[in-house]
Structures are given as C-alpha cells and as structure tokens.
C-alpha cells in the first residue's frame, strides 16, 4: 500500500531498494505548493522528456492534487496502490509520482535505454532476403514480428520469468493456425519454470525441452524475423525473451537443421540442390573421420589400390597410430574454431595463420600428421559450417563415431549411424515426432524436406504441426 | 536389474563380431601380384610388395630404389610359404589388394585344386584376382617386367588382361570364375596365359639394358583337363572359344574382302583356313568391329547321335575395308556380312577340331547344355562326356549384321579411275 506521507513512501522505497545508488528520489514543490516526489532508476528513463513533459507541467501548472492526470499529458499513466506493483513498474523503466496526502501513486512509462540498432545477424547471414535481425529488446522484437504478420490473429502472450532477473517473455502464435496442443504444452512448461535468472533464451530452452539429456536440440532458435514468421505461419509457437536476439520456435523437426530462409527465396531446383548438399555435408561432417580411421585400420581392401598406396606413402614415418592422430586433429580443429570465435578480431588473423600454416603444412612436413588426415579434417570442418544449426550435435557425434570407428571398424561406425538415426526418430518435440516428415511419413511435409517443391505446390501447411486451418492457398486450377 | 543384465548381454554381443585385427598402414606389406611355382616339389611364393616410401618420394625427388620389391618364400604349401616370408621380410604381407596370381607351368601341370585351396579359404584374398599361367616358364620370370606406363607392374598386368574387352584373344578368368568352371558339369576350364616377349629394338642408339627390352603378352589361353594344364590355345582359337562361350563384348573380326563383280559372275572368295589366316599374297582383308554379340548353344540327340549346335548373332560396324568394293551398295554389304560370318565359322570350326582331336576335352561347355536339355541321359553318359564330345557332330550358324560403315563409303583405293 502507498502511504499518504511522502517521507514514509520515501523511506519504504529506499528500504525496499536497499539504498541502491542508481535509484533517484527527487522531491520537489509545485508553484501551488504541493509537495511531490518522483522516483525512477537512473538510465532507465528519458530524462529530457521527463524534465519537459512531466516536471515542467507539474511545477508550473498543477493546481490541485486531483489534477495530476490532467496536467501530465500521456497515454501511459497508471494509478498504482500497492508497493509491489510500484516496484515492478519502477524496475521496468517507469517513473513513479507521489504527492503529499495522496494515498496512491502514478507511474508513467517513459523508459529509454541504450540498445543496438536492428542490423543483419551474423549467425544467419543471407544473400537474398531481408537483412534485419532481432535485437536484445523484446518490444522491438515484437514489432519486427508484427511487421511481418500484420494480422489480428497474431497474439503475444506475456509473462515474466526469473525471480531476480524478472525477464520479460512473450509467446507468439497465430490464433486459428497454431497447434493448440503445442501451445498448451508450451504454456504449461513455461509456468513450471522456477528459476532465479533467465539471461538468454537458452535458459528457457533447456528448462522446457523434451529430453534434457539428449545431444540433439529439440528447440529451434533464430535471429531473423522472417524465419520466425515463417515458422509461426506453419503453426509453430515462438518464444521471445527479453535481452537476447535469439527467438525460440517449437516444435522443431530434424529437417529444419538443413533449411535456411533463403531456400524459399531462390528457385526450387537450386534450393533442392542446396538441401541435398547440406544433408550430404552433414553426413560427411559426422562420419568422415570415423569412417576414415575405420577404413585405414580395418578395411584396407575397401580403399582403391592406388589411393591406398599413396596413403601408405603419406603414413610412412608418422609416429602416432592413425586413431590417435585423427582424434588429435579433430580436437585441434575444435580448439582452432573456439579460439577463432572468442578472440578479438585483431588477433583473429593470427589464429588463421597459426592454424593453417603450423597445424596444416608444418605438421605434415614434420611428419607428425599425415597429409590425408589433414585433408579429411579439412573436409569435415568445411562440411560442418554448411549446417550451422546442427553444429552442437555434429561435433559430439563425430567424436563418438570416431571412437567407435577406431575400436570396431566399419561395424562400429554403422552402430553409430544406427544410434544416431534411432535417436532422431525416437525424439519428440512438444508432442511432434522429430523425424517428420520421414518418420512418420507425411506427404505434405515431404514436399518441403530434402527436395523443396515450388511455392505454388505448398497448398497445405505441414499437417502434423498445424492441425487446423491447414489450407495455405487455393490449389492451382487444372487445365 | 533385469534391464542391466539384458543391456550387458547386448553390449557384450557387440564384441562377438567386428574386426579385431586393426593394422596400421605403416605395418603393411601391400602385395599386388603373387607368383606360385614349384621348386623341388615345394611351393615357391614370389610376392610383389609395394614400397610406399618410393611412391611418396617420386613426386618430389628422384626416388631411390624401386616402386616395388619382390620377396620370396618356400614351403610345403602356400601358407607355409607365406609364413616363410615373415622371417625374411619386415612387414606382414597384406594380400587384400592382390589382383593377379601367376602360376608357373610346373605348378599348373601338377593340378591346381589340390594346391590352391588357400587362395579361397583366406579371408583376405579377393576372389576377383586374375589367374594367369606363365607360358613355358616360371612365374617369377615374368614378374617385374613392366613395359607399360603404369608405375606398378601389377597394374600393367591387370590393365592388359582387362583389355580383353577390346581384343578377345585372351581370357580374363579370375579365381571365382575358375572354380565355377571347375565345378561345372562337362566343362573344362581355360585360363589366361602370360609370357615374356622380347621387343624389337626401337632406338638403336640406346644400349640394351635388362628388362627394358621385354614386354608381357597375354595373348592366348591355357587349357586345363579338370585342373591339370594340358596345353595352350593361340590367340585366334581363344577368340573362337570366347565366341562359343558368349563372352565377346568387343574386338574385331578380320576376313578376306569379297570381290564385287558384275552380277552372276561373282567368284566366291578363295577358301581360307580359319579367321585371320596366314595372309596369302595379294589377298585383301577387311575388318568388322563387334558391337554386340549373342551366342546360343544347343545340343540335339538324334538316334543316339549327338549333334552340337551353335548359333551366333553378331552386330558390327565396318572398321576397315581393303579391296575393290563399294559398301554403299546393299548387295556388297550382304557379301561382306557373309564373308565375316564365314570367317567366324571357320575359326570356330578350327578351334572345335583342336579341342576334339588334339585334347579330346570339352572346353566350350556343351556338356552343361546337354545336362540341362537331357537330364536323364546325362546321368548315364556324364562319365564319358569328353569321349562323346570328341565324336560329336558340330553345326554352326553365324549371322552377321553390319549396321554402320564408318565415315566413308568407298574404300579409298577404289576411287581413282575405277
């Protein structure tokens, strides 16, 4: 509750905020001799507007306490009568106004803080298609999404997560198209979250995913509004989280890992070719080191004679066994990658020089690593970057397959393949099978899988995701 | 608990299979050709092993040594000979890439089946390795000769055997084909031969140096009675046998050019003995390139007499026409077709006679045809099939169809003034 006396309010607020230094409590008196107090957090509000449009009219024009709402001309003014709500509002960038002998407070939303401009996301750059990306501010993100889907069916449902961070979360979906079961499941799982802090959507992802122990991610994330809009159009639910440009979409299918937004903007033949290429690259990236070691150690008869002889020539004088050598190179690749990501850009070139020259050429010339191994690792790395969405799973499975291949040969890598596929097809994402549209087979979904059919052939939404209102467009007239 | 037991059984069962014998590449002695000989009634194995360091050097520096090394081992059987090598050679032989087996003549004459069980039993051995008999000598005598561009002698040998598809004067029998032929009823196998031939000296200024003046030739084939080497066929007879066995996929047929005369007075071409005979003086020879060939063998039993029949349908294109004949004329094409058919017929008859009279064994596989057509009678006569074969009548019909004549219609020597 709010006290009538300003001094009491002041004391309570200071107590509640533990005398924090960025809290501003500004007491002033109007020309009509009304004692007033404004309370806000420094850096959260637009000071200029506050001085001009709030302080000035109050001090100069306010005659009676009752007239506060009439004096300050803003649509974002609320009457607050409980201390809890007041603190909540102050923390989200509102200004609280108290007046002597007034048992309530007004909060005016005047938030303004430093934020990044909308720019092209680095993780999902495209040649064709919109270049804008989500930013860290949820309000901007919502407006970006709304600009893609200008329909009254687009619904945002807000909630706040994190006992200390009080992070704003927003669930976005298209009313009438969204899969209700998924939506209910998302809401249920979000409501069960009880954590002190949510600093990134990754927190939410790990708290609500179907299989918390699985290597495979069952929640998709994107930085691009057009991608999020496309997913929502297919009946998915997007979860926006304040403070991060990464928007989550559920449910996720495995095939989404090899899709990009650009696939839909270029012509279907090329898009299908690219999809096929990415699937191949995925397999190469996961299996090539394991199969390489398996073939070299156990199945020399499967390598063409001339290639085998040149491989033997390259291995002459290499001290390490091939399994260890390959493992070493795979780990080196990860280290190089990691250092490239973390290093400031100025030092980045050093890494590439050290990586290519020292690890590649010099290691081969010194006879520590054989040239075919370096080639295999290079192919592995290049292929990996083709499917960035799946990188986490790919790297770990690669190691597993490599170990299996080193100890059990092709038998082991085949076991690894079976485990990989089994894991994919048994996983579910919010009740939707992860292996769609292949297992279970879904005719509409297959049109947009490894092959992308022309847009005019997408008459229905993928049925398994959007259960209702699945028609997208009129079927083309025959004849 | 039950789950853990089941799971552990599952995991343990993984160890029951798989390839436990991991071998690093730098521990392998990659063997590409194996020669088998009999020396003092013991098996002498000669293996051509790749020298990987040489292959690495060859691109950068002028490598020392050679691309392959030859190692030898002696034993009472093949496996013992292999193991004999281990105490003389630093790397274990890996025969997973072995492409060619060269059998010495002595070895082949002793009978193969009792000796080469190991080649089939060994898990490492490829069944597609070619079998070749070193004609008139030892296997190790032909090994190491490389007259081709391939750096590896083994590749040189493999490639010339595989050229069978351009010139069917040889056979490309491999291990599995040999054993299939061996087990076929009433069929004696033929396998390829290899022999060393001296080259004509090309550059007189270069001094003769070692193996440079030799080349290998795989023309011809070796005839086996059951599994014992009994004799050789020359290249043309081998081609005829391939015709009967429906193995022709390419190659050429050479025959005397029929003379194109005014109607009614056309003289038949002078009779020649077989295909590609010793060319008579002033005889014009033409060639047809085989595009497609289909052979059907049949056996007929009339009043206890057995008649072997072969029908050949050949489709080809003209490769070379020498002589005064205008191939733009339909009749002349028919004449050429008839002449070509005649040449094939004569060649096959000659090879047939050789098999019947000289060796008295069925190398064409008519026994199998008989077995399929008259299964009851076969039971009675299968013991004596070779004898019956050498008495049997033979009938052959060849149809040639020339569907293309090449780029020019008239032989170039015809045009001027005639």
Image: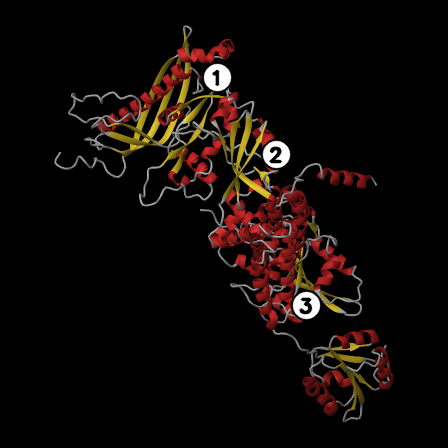
Q: Are marks 2 and 1 in contact (CB under 8 Å)?
A: no
Label 3 to label 1: alpha-carbon separation: 82 Å
| Residue depicted at 65% across the width and 50% down the height | A323
**Other residues around mark 3 within 10 Å, as few (<14) / some (14–19) / many (≥20):** some
Q: Which residue corresponds to mark 3?
A: A244
**Residue B365 percent across, percent down from the top left:** 45, 20
Whole-percent x, y for residue A225 in the image: 60, 64
Residue behind mark 2: B83
Work out whether disc 3 and disc 1 sit on a shared chain. no
Mark 1 secondary-structure assignment:
loop
Residue at the disc numbered 1: B186
Quarter residue A407 falls in: top right
Q: Nearer the viewer, residue A237 or B51?
A: B51
Residue A256's spot in the image, x, y percent?
61, 54
- Local secondary structure at mark 3: loop
Is residue B60 found left or right of A297 in the rendered image? Answer: left
Q: Chain of mark 1?
A: B
Alpha carbon separation for disc pair 3 and 2: 69 Å
Share a chain, discs 2 and 1?
A: yes
Q: Give the crowd class for mark 2: few <14, some 14-19, many >=20 residues within 10 Å.
A: some
Residue at figure coordinates x 52%, y 27% from the top left: B38
- Which subunit holds the residue at mark 2? B
Q: Considering only order in the chain, which callout, 1 or 2, is on the residue closer to the N terminus?
A: 2
- B99 left or right of A47 in image: left
Judging from the image, what secondary structure is the residue with disc 2 in? helix
Q: Tell me the residue at 59%/33% (across/down).
A: B82
Whether residues under marks 3 and 2 lie with C-beta atoms below 8 angstroms apart, the answer is no
């Amino acid at each position: 509750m709010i006290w009538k006396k300003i001094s009491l309010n002041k004391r309570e607020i200071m107590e509640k905020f533990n005398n924090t230094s960025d809290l501003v409590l500004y007491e002033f008196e109007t020309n009509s001799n009304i004692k007033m107090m404004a309370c806000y957090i420094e850096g959260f509000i637009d000071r200029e507007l506050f001085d001009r449009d709030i302080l000035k009219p109050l001090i100069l024009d306010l005659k009676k306490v009752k007239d506060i709402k009439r004096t300050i001309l803003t649509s974002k003014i609320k009457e607050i009568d409980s201390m809890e709500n007041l603190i909540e509002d102050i923390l989200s960038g509102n200004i609280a106004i108290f007046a002597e002998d007034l048992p309530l407070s007004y909060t005016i939303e005047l938030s303004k803080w430093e934020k990044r401009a909308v720019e092209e996301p680095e993780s999902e750059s495209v040649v064709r298609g919109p270049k804008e990306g989500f930013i860290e501010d949820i309000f901007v993100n919502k407006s970006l999404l709304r600009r893609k889907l200008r329909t009254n069916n687009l619904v945002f449902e807000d909630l706040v997560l994190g006992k200390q961070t009080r992070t704003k979360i927003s669930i976005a979906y298209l009313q009438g198209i969204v899969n209700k079961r998924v939506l209910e499941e998302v809401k249920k799982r979000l409501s069960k979250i009880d954590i002190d802090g949510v600093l990134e959507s990754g927190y939410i992802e790990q708290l609500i995913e179907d299989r918390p122990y699985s290597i495979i991610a069952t929640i998709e994330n994107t930085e691009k509004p057009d991608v999020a809009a496309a997913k929502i159009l297919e009946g998915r639910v997007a979860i926006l989280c304040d403070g991060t440009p990464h928007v989550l979409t559920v449910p996720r299918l495995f095939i989404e890992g090899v899709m990009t937004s650009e696939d839909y903007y270029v012509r279907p033949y090329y898009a299908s070719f690219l999809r096929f290429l990415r699937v191949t690259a995925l397999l190469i990236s996961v299996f090539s080191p394991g199969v390489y070691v398996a073939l070299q150690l156990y199945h020399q008869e499967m390598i063409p004679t001339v290639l085998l002889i040149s491989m033997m020539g390259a291995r002459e004088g290499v001290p390490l066994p091939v399994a260890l050598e390959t493992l070493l190179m795979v780990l080196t690749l990860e280290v190089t990658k990691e250092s490239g990501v973390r290093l400031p850009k100025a030092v980045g070139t050093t890494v590439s020089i050290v990586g290519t020259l020292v690890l590649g050429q010099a290691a081969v010339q010194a006879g520590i690593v054989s040239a075919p191994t370096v080639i295999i690792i290079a192919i592995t790395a290049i292929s990996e970057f083709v499917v960035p969405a799946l990188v986490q799973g790919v790297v770990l499975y690669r190691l597993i397959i490599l170990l299996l291949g080193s100890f059990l040969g092709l038998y082991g890598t085949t076991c690894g393949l079976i485990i990989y596929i089994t894991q994919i097809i048994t996983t579910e994402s919010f009740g939707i099978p992860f292996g769609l549209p292949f297992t279970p087979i879904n005719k509409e979904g297959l049109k947009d899988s490894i092959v992308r059919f022309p847009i005019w052939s997408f008459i229905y939404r993928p049925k398994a995701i959007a259960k209702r209102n699945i028609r997208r467009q009129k079927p083309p007239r025959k004849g | 608990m039950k789950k853990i037991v089941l799971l552990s059984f599952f995991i343990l069962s993984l160890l029951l299979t798989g390839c436990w014998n991991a071998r690093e590449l730098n521990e392998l002695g990659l063997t590409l050709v194996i020669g088998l000989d009999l020396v003092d009634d013991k098996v002498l194995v000669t293996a051509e092993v790749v020298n990987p360091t040489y292959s690495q050097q060859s691109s950068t520096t002028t490598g020392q040594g050679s691309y392959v090394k030859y190692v030898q081992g002696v034993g009472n059987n093949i496996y013992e000979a292999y193991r004999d090598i281990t105490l003389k050679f630093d790397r274990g032989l890996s025969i997973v890439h072995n492409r060619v087996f060269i059998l010495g003549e002595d070895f082949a004459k002793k009978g193969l089946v009792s000796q080469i069980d190991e080649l089939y039993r060994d898990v490492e051995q490829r069944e597609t390795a070619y079998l070749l008999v070193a004609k008139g000598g030892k296997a190790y005598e032909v090994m190491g000769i490389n007259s081709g561009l391939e750096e590896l002698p083994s590749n040189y040998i493999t490639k010339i055997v595989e050229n069978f598809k351009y010139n069917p004067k040889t056979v490309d029998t491999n291990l599995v084909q040999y054993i299939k032929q061996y087990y076929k009823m009433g069929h004696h196998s033929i396998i390829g031969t290899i022999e060393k031939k001296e080259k004509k000296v090309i550059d007189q200024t270069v001094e003769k140096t070692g193996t440079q003046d030799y080349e290998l030739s795989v023309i011809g084939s070796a005839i086996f009675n059951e599994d014992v080497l009994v004799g050789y066929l020359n290249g043309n007879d081998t081609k005829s046998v391939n015709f009967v066995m429906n193995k022709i996929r390419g190659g050429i047929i050479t025959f005397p050019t029929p003379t194109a005369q005014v109607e009614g007075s056309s003289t038949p071409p002078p009779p020649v003995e077989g295909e590609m005979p010793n060319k008579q003086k002033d005889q014009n020879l033409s060639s047809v390139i085989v595009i497609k060939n289909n052979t059907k063998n049949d056996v007929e039993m009339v009043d206890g007499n057995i008649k072997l029949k072969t029908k050949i349908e050949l489709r080809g294109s003209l490769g070379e026409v020498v002589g005064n004949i205008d191939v733009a004329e339909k009749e002349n094409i028919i004449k050429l077709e008839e002449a070509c058919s005649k040449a094939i017929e004569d060649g096959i008859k000659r090879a047939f006679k050789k098999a019947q009279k000289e060796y008295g064994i069925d190398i064409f596989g008519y026994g199998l045809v008989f077995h399929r057509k008259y299964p009851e009678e076969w039971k009675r006569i299968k013991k004596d099939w070779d004898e019956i074969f050498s008495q049997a009548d033979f009938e052959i019909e060849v149809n040639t169809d020339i569907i293309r004549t090449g780029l020019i219609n008239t032989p170039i020597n015809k045009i001027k003034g005639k």
